[in-house]
Image (cartoon, rainbow, N blue to C red):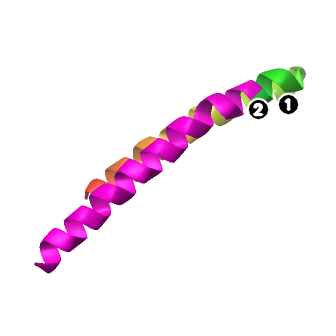
Amino acid sequence: MTDIKEFVMGFVGIIVGITVAVTLLPVISTVIAAANITGTAGILLGMITVLVSIGIILFVIKALY
């Protein structure tokens, strides 16, 4: 019974984590675009969405194994 409980808790955690992250991605992109920052700071801020996406993938992989 405890195996089922751990599986369900992990599965729900994955779903909630993905939902929160996917909901935040457009908000992060919009804020970065509205900031109108150029140069090196603009390049670094543009990479934030990529890093968040990689973080989502790593979270899912970690939660599955």
How many tags in the picture? 2
Q: Determine whether 31 is above or below 61 in the image.
A: above
Residue 2: image location, x then y, percent: 16, 79
Residue 1 position within the rendered picture, expressed as x and y whole percent measured from the top left: 10, 78
Q: Quadrant of the image for the C terminus? A: bottom left
Extreme residue toward the bottom, this view: 2
| The stretch drawn in magenta includes residue 12 | yes
Is residue 51 visible from the viewing direction of this image? no
| SS state under label 1 | helix
Q: Residue at x 53, y 43 (%)?
A: 21
Query: What span is in magenta?
Result: 1-30
Q: Is residue 10 left or right of residue 48?
A: left
27 relative to 50 in the view: left or right: right
Label 1: few (<14), some (14–19) or many (≥20) C-alpha neighbours in 10 Å:
few
Residue picked out by circle 1: 41
Quarter of the view holding residue 26 = top right
Say whether residue 32 is left or right of residue 7. Answer: right
Residue tagged 2: 45
- x%, y% of residue 58? 42, 48
Q: Amino acid at mark 2?
A: Leu
Q: Is residue 38 above or below residue 60?
A: above
Circle 2 Cα neighbour tier, 10 Å, few/some/many (<14 / 14–19 / ≥20)? some
Mark 1 and mark 2 in contact? Answer it, CB < 8 Å. yes
Residue depicted at 14% across the width and 74% down the height: 3
As helix, strand or loop, the secondary structure at mark 2 comes to helix
- Between marks 1 and 2, how big is the CA–CA gap? 6 Å
The secondary structure that most of the magenta stretch takes on is helix
Residue 35 is at least partly visible in this image = yes
Residue furthest to the left in view is 1
